[in-house]
Image: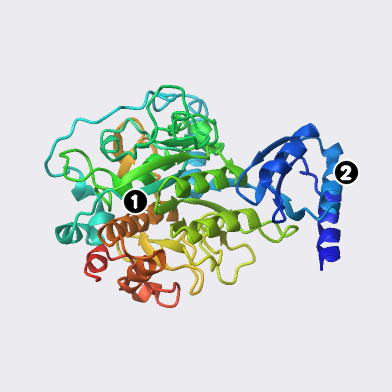
């Protein structure tokens, strides 16, 4: 068996064009730190990602050295460091194309002011009162959050929003930011010895700094070329915008804490996703909100085992992984059970995943939303969703000059992440499996979703909070 594995991996190394950016799983009990030190001594950039995976970058001509390491029996698997993107809003792309065709000279004109890594606020001025924009949140009201809050508004459970970052200066997000209790702000010391200096509210794994700000695109051309529209901020508001503070909106979990982890701009990598997930788990997050992914895996490599393994790491530490089911192909949803390129990581078999589809205000499955009787679990509001946006704003449209709205399983996923946090904060004795079961068992069954997901229904937070 070892000979077969070795032959496959040697073949991989000898044929891959991208052999200069690899993820390597070392055999136990080989230390990833030891392996990383070895590759570094050979002139390659290397970092240990987990206890079993390392990231190696360098000259493809040194593949022979990798082969030598493989010959020693120290390697279990070699794979590409896959690129990862936020779930695409195809409707937005279509609207952008039409706009640029009609206004070819305006693509480079900014529609919003740029903001680059502002200081992290130390605290927020607290106030009380009804959230004035809550009536605009059709999704929140549709899933029964207000009655759910009457049962229990929840408390300070940690939710990691793993995305494009968050506008951490937003008036409705500042009060619910997770604050690392073991880190002294701005002293340039890694006080908690976790490898990250001054990681006060999380980390930016894309820029490798402690300010995971949501650097949204400011022109139509940037958006058209795959720029981030402020995705992470919109998602974070659905999870846990502060409730009852007399400002803006409320998330499903109005008292939860948002751990901000940025690993995607226009795109990200598997290595940075792994580091984000591991950081979240190691620093106390119980729920991970993941509105990103891709259409299937590379057929030449079968699967992204490194990503599967770190999701398993979360499961082993009793952490839920909420994932967007996918926005189809060019805006047309498909069956993740049967398609050759199912939405991933939502379709992975890890038990701690809750895969989320999107419904509109009329209980119809979004035309873009993937589904799957075996691989998609539940639906949640994901069409024309009103939430927080960059620069302390709120909207259900991506930019004012277009008709494109905030649509996607990306918007549905945070509703379920917030629901998981709300319920789990009230029932801390529950396991991830019990929380997942409660969410799926309390779903409202809908004819439009029958046979298209494991729960056959959409999220019902009121009924969830009635669960023992």
The picture places residue 392, in percent across and down from the top left corner, at: 30, 32
Q: Is residue 250 left or right of residue 108?
A: left
Task: Please report the residue visible at 34 percent of the width from the left and 55 percent of the height from the top.
Answer: 415
Per the model, the C-alpha gap separating discs 1 and 2 is 53 Å
Q: Is residue 207 visible?
A: yes
Which of disc 2 and disc 1 is earlier in sequence?
2
Answer few, some or many: residues within 10 Å of disc 1's Cα (few below 14, many 20 plus, some between 14 and 19): many
The picture places residue 216, in percent across and down from the top left corner, at: 45, 33
Tell me the tag on residue 384: 1
Q: Is residue 323 left or right of residue 425?
A: right
Q: Is residue 382 visible?
A: no
Q: Secondary structure at mark 2?
A: helix
Q: Secondary structure at mark 1?
A: loop
Q: Is residue 109 left or right of residue 142?
A: right
Q: Is residue 376 above or below residue 24?
A: below
Task: Please report the residue visible at 33 percent of the width from the left and 74 percent of the height from the top.
Answer: 441
Q: Which residue is mark 2?
A: 64
């Amino acid at each position: 068996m070892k000979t077969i594995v070795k032959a496959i991996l040697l073949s991989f190394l000898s044929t891959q064009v991208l052999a200069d950016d690899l993820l390597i799983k070392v055999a136990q009990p080989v230390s990833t730190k030891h392996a990383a030190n070895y590759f570094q001594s050979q002139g390659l950039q290397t970092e240990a990602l987990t206890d079993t995976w390392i990231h190696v970058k360098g000259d493809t001509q040194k593949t022979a050295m990798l082969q030598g390491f493989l010959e020693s029996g120290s390697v279990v698997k070699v794979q590409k460091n896959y690129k990862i993107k936020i779930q695409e809003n195809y409707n937005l792309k279509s609207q952008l194309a039409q706009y640029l065709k009609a206004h070819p000279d305006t693509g480079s004109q900014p529609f919003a002011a740029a903001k680059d890594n502002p200081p992290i606020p130390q605290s927020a001025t607290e106030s009380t009162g009804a959230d004035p924009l809550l009536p605009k949140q059709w999704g929140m009201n549709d899933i029964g959050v207000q009655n759910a809050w009457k049962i229990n508004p929840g408390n300070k459970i940690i939710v990691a929003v793993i995305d494009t970052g968050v506008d951490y200066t937003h008036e409705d997000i500042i009060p619910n930011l997770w604050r690392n209790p073991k880190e002294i702000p701005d002293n340039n010391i890694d006080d908690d010895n976790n490898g990250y200096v001054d990681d006060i509210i999380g980390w930016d794994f894309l820029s490798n700094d402690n300010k995971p700000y949501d650097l949204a695109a400011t022109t139509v051309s940037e958006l058209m070329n795959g720029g981030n529209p402020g995705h992470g901020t919109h998602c974070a508001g659905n999870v846990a915008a502060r409730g009852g503070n007399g400002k803006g909106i409320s998330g499903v979990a109005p008292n939860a804490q948002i751990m901000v982890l940025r690993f995607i701009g226009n795109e990200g990598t598997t290595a940075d996703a792994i580091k984000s997930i591991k950081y979240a788990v190691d620093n106390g997050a119980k729920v991970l909100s993941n509105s990103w992914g891709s259409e299937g895996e590379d057929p030449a490599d079968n699967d992204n085992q490194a990503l599967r393994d770190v999701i398993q790491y979360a499961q082993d530490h009793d952490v839920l992984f909420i994932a967007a089911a996918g926005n189809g192909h060019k805006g047309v949803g498909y069956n993740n059970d049967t398609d050759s390129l199912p939405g991933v990581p939502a379709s992975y078999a890890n038990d701690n995943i809750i895969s989320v589809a999107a419904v509109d205000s009329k209980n119809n499955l979004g035309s873009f939303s993937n589904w799957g009787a075996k691989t998609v679990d539940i639906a949640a509001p994901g069409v024309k969703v009103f939430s927080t946006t960059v620069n302390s704003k709120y909207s259900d449209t991506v930019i004012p000059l277009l008709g494109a709205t905030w649509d996607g399983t990306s918007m549905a996923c945070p509703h379920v992440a917030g629901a998981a946090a709300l319920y789990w904060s009230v029932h801390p004795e529950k396991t991830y499996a019990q929380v997942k079961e409660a969410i799926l068992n309390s779903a409202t069954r809908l004819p439009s979703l029958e046979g298209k997901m494991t729960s056959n229904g959409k999220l019902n937070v009121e009924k969830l909070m009635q669960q023992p």
